[in-house]
Image (tube, grey):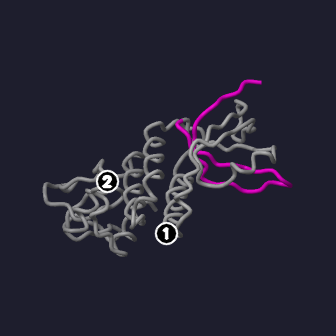
């Protein structure tokens, strides 16, 4: 029996039959689905802990979990509803976008950094918005530029990830004000978490960013 050990964050856990769990773990090796038989590991079934996971390496999508231990329980995430809800939104974005066992070391490092910072934000939705945009950028689904992809005019809209000016936008394009466009750029490209705290994320802009991933 070949075993593999990997660090990863638990995104989702659900019961299977009696006292068994199926765990969705995001790791540098990609999204793993682990089948936990041991009830003695119950303390590891709470999202969103970062753990060390040992599983049987097989040519299957559902892999048996052998053992696990906690690296960081991220307990601060559970202090407020807003922070916990934000963590769930980031987890949902990953679960919907990542293929099983597709290595994503850079995205994993980004994910851990965002989860570790969530509890320090008074407005955690700013981090959620930034993560959604960086995820689209990582997946090659966002070509955010100041100039229109068709002409050299100033871009004000996004359509299927492409930046477009007012003249070339379509009925399905998502349009932004000048301030919103600057904020989208900041949320997408900035590498400093402190920059995200300064952004005025309105409900309208939050919904526009959410629509970009659909």
Q: Quadrant of the N terminus?
A: top right
At 19% from the left edge and 67% from the top edge, which residue is drawn? 167
Residue 73 position, x and y percent, is: 59, 50
Q: Earlier in the sequence, mark 1 or mark 2?
A: 1
Based on the picture, tell me whether residue 10 belongs to the magenta stretch.
Answer: yes
49, 3: nearer the viewer: 49
In the shown orientation, is residue 205 left or right of residue 77? left
Characterize the local packing of mark 2: few (<14), some (14-19) or many (20 or more) Cα atoms within 10 angstroms: many
Please tell me the numbered disc located at residue 134. none
Residue furthest bottom as drawn: 203
**Which residue is under mark 1?**
82
- 171 to 3, vertically: above or below: below
Q: Which residues are magenta?
A: 1-28
At 41% from the left edge and 55% from the top edge, which residue is drawn? 131
Characterize the local packing of mark 1: few (<14), some (14-19) or many (20 or more) Cα atoms within 10 angstroms: some
In the shown orientation, is residue 130 left or right of residue 96? left
98, 124: nearer the viewer: 124
At 56% from the left edge and 56% from the top edge, which residue is drawn? 75
**Which residue is under mark 2?**
188
In the shown orientation, is residue 4 left or right of residue 192? right
Residue furthest top as drawn: 2
Quote the CA–CA distance across marks 1 and 2.
22 Å
At 37% from the left edge and 75% from the top edge, which residue is drawn? 203
Residue 68 position, x and y percent, is: 69, 39
**Predominant secondary structure in magenta?**
strand
Based on the picture, tell me whether residue 176 belongs to the magenta stretch.
Answer: no
């Amino acid at each position: 029996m070949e075993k593999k050990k990997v660090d990863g964050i638990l995104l989702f856990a659900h019961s299977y039959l009696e006292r068994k769990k199926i765990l969705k773990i995001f790791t540098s090796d990609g999204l793993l689905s682990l089948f936990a038989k041991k009830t003695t590991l119950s303390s590891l079934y709470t999202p969103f802990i970062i753990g060390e996971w040992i599983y049987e390496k097989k040519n299957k999508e559902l892999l048996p979990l052998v053992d696990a231990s906690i690296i960081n329980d991220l307990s601060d995430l559970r202090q407020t509803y807003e922070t916990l809800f934000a963590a769930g939104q980031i987890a949902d974005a990953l679960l919907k976008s990542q293929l099983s066992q597709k290595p994503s070391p850079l995205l994993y490092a980004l994910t851990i950094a965002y989860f570790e910072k969530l509890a320090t934000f008074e407005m955690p939705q700013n981090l959620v918005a930034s993560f959604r945009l960086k995820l689209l950028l990582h997946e090659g689904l966002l070509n955010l530029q100041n100039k229109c992809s068709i002409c050299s005019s100033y871009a004000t809209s996004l359509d299927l990830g492409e930046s477009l000016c007012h003249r070339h936008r379509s009925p399905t394009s998502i349009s932004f004000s000048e301030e919103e466009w600057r904020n989208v750029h900041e949320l997408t490209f900035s590498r400093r978490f402190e920059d995200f705290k300064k952004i005025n994320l309105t409900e309208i802009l939050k919904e526009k960013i959410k629509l970009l991933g659909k």
